Amino acid sequence: EAGRPAAGRKGAHSHDGGKLLNAEVANGLSTEEAISRAERHTHHLDQPARPQLRSVYMLEISVSDPEKHGTSAVNAFVDFKVHTTTDMPRYAARSFFVRRRYRDFVWLRGQLCLSYPGAIVPPLPLVDSLIKDDRFSAAFIQRRQAGLELFLRRVAASKQLSVSTELQTFLEAKVWELQTVKNASSGSWFASIFDGTEASFKRVQLTFRQKVPDESEIEKLRVFAREYESVVSTAASKHHAFVHTLSEIASDLGQLGPALDMLSQSETELSLPFTHMASALDRLKQLHLKHVQAEHVSGLSALLAFNAGMASALKEVLSNRDAALIQYQRASSALDSRTLERQKFQEQEQGQGPKPRRSGMLGHFDDLMYDPKRGSKIDTKLLDAERELALSKERWEAISGAIHDEAAAFHTQTSADFSRGLREHVVEQISFQEAQQQQWRELLDVFKQIETVPCGSFRASSSGS
């Protein structure tokens, strides 16, 4: 399938390939140099040609029309209309749609991470929103819808992910068909190395660093990913606090307006100005609420949160690279063990010849222990070890070959996102401030019609007299 690492290519390593890899690594060579030397003593894998995706192909995806199903707080859920427009020949129709719920998106991202461990898979919107509101509220659903659409659009823009079988199944399959595929989804090679705990990640990282020194570019990428995630997460938190302040202002305005409206009933001479001011404060409250929602749907808050997720996804790819290398090393060691087992068996068979049969219970025990198929079983295990080494090598090379391109695309996309996002943020702030000023100007026109109080202004003179 185009854009996806092959699951099983023909060819196998020679018996001493694993030993050579570990020896070169132990001598302090970089991983790539060790692999290059090891390959001189191994059979080359067949490299079938991969069909290329034409750049003119179109794949546009939108998420809309949320619908709530069920009334129970436990069983109720919201699904969305996922509409696809494409001219890719792999799809049965040019324009079609399905309905998907959040857990379906979670499945898709998980499968993409498993099938493309070298690709930076875009993040999904967080399950636990920082904004404390009902998950069935219109505001929460709008934010989730925007996040899900951004996820799919970024997947569709990826050269690898856009041609994946998983994406096609997600976009085309009927609900029951998708559920069947989800039920059949199995674990990954990654799970065989990591058990999902923090301790396992530390053990793998320690083992990796002890055996294979990172190349300078990868080490720099590790530092960048770690620092970038920290910085962008801090920025997202601080900006969220700022937006939360705007939300609190909206709440205060919502309480101040009715209070002034009540005051208008006591000060009858100023009833009209108080009433106008109460109405203006209500409109200002709505402006603030609209601005807060816009920030979380498509504003700077959404941009920062998404990029924090992208930084985390970059770290996932680096961890996948570590896991693939460790699996490659384990396969090399396993091949060494099987090769040694076969050599010992052959030496034993050639050097000793047939043993005389012992009498009595010892002879019966010899009969039980004798396996005429032992040699063929050892050969089968050796072939399996060679095959596993070939597959693990291919997996390692696929991730290592993609990670630099993925990192470059990450930097390019991040730069474009912030260039556009910051510009739009400034425009939105200006529009927000102008809308507020407009409300105050209209209110000022009302107060200009009020006769000035003879005793003078309530405010103190700027000169202090």
Image (cartoon, helix red, strand yellow):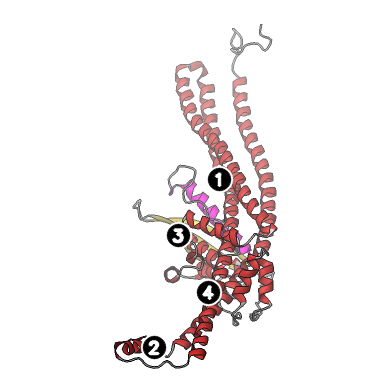
Counting from the top left corner in percent of width and height, residue 189 is at 51, 68
CA–CA distance in space, label 1 to label 2: 72 Å
CA–CA distance in space, label 4 to label 3: 39 Å
Numbered range of the magenta stretch: 135-159
Camera-side residue of 115 and 10 = 10
- Who comes first in sequence, dot 3 or dot 1? 3
Camera-side residue of 398 and 383 = 383
Q: Circle 4 sits on which residue?
A: 334
Residue 352, above or below 289: below
- Who comes first in sequence, dot 1 or dot 2? 1
Question: Looking at the image, which residue is at 54% across and 69% down?
Answer: 330
- Who comes first in sequence, dot 1 or dot 4? 1
Name the image quarter holding residue 231: top right
CA–CA distance in space, label 1 to label 4: 51 Å
The amino acid on which the numbered mark 2 sits, given as a three-letter code, is: Tyr
The amino acid on which the numbered mark 1 sits, given as a three-letter code, is: His
CA–CA distance in space, label 2 to label 3: 55 Å
Q: Nearer the viewer, mark 1 or mark 2?
A: 2
CA–CA distance in space, label 3 to label 1: 21 Å
Question: Looking at the image, which residue is at 50% across and 80% down?
Answer: 341
Q: Circle 3 sits on which residue?
A: 103
Q: Is the magenta stretch mostly helix, strand or loop?
A: helix
Q: Circle 1 sits on which residue?
A: 296
